[in-house]
Amino acid sequence: MDWLRSANTHEHAQGLDARIIDVGPKWVVVRLNSDREVHQLQPDLAHMATCDRTWGTVGITEDPVCGSGNGCVAAFIRELALPGLFPEGHIAGQGMAIGRNGRVRIGYVDATIHVTGQAITVISGHMTLPLTR
């Protein structure tokens, strides 16, 4: 986790619960004490770019709202036995730092995590792929 600690300058992130959750893309989830602490983070984007090259990601610094990322946070909350803090689920906000406020609703139903929200279709179409054998 040294690379994670070096990826930000927030002293409260040192030594807290952190997990890498793999849902195809790998998500790093860290428990902080408040939303204020989240907003105080100053990620080292140059270092993160080296991680992008290593892991083959696309280099987007923040997605306005990401269902798979918020689903990983929900899995992290469930793993730490924290859903009791949000028995009905919770609403996650994302994108404020880039001026694109978004909301995702998280629900815990039995062993299932539900991620819901609104979306806008920006492009649609069809793709024909060749069959391979």
Image (spheres, rainbow, N blue to C red):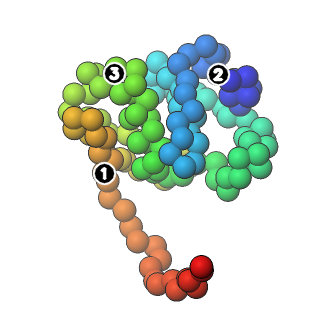
Question: Residue 82 got which mark?
Answer: 3
Looking at marks 3 and 1 on the same chain, the residue that comes earlier in the sequence is marked by 3
Count residues near mark 2 (Cα–Cα under 10 Å), then give few for <14, some for 14-19, many for 20+.
some
Count residues near mark 1 (Cα–Cα under 10 Å), then give few for <14, some for 14-19, many for 20+.
some
Q: Amino acid at mark 3?
A: Leu
- Image: 7 above or below 130: above
Q: Amino acid at mark 2?
A: His
What residue sits 29% from the left and 45% below the top? 114
Q: What secondary structure is found at the residue carrying circle 2?
A: loop
Q: What secondary structure is found at the residue carrying circle 3?
A: loop
* Left/right of residue 86 with respect to residue 37 in the rendered view: left
Labels 3 & 1 near each other (Cβ < 8 A): no
Question: Residue 132 got which mark?
Answer: none
Give how far apart the Cα atoms at labels 2 and 3 are: 23 Å
Residue indicated by mark 2: 10
Q: Nearer the viewer, residue 58 or 54?
A: 54
Residue indicated by mark 1: 116
Residue 108 image point, x, y percent: 26, 36
What residue sits 30% from the left and 51% below the top? 116
Q: What secondary structure is found at the residue carrying circle 1?
A: strand
* Left/right of residue 21 with respect to residue 41 in the rendered view: left
Residue 14 image point, x, y percent: 63, 16
Total marks shown come to 3
Quarter of the rendering occupied by the N terminus = top right
Looking at marks 2 and 3 on the same chain, the residue that comes earlier in the sequence is marked by 2
Quarter of the rendering occupied by the C terminus = bottom right
Residue 6 image point, x, y percent: 74, 26
Q: Nearer the viewer, residue 107 or 36?
A: 107
Give how far apart the Cα atoms at labels 1 and 2 are: 30 Å
What residue sits 35% from the left and 27% below the top? 78
* Left/right of residue 9 with respect to residue 107 in the rendered view: right
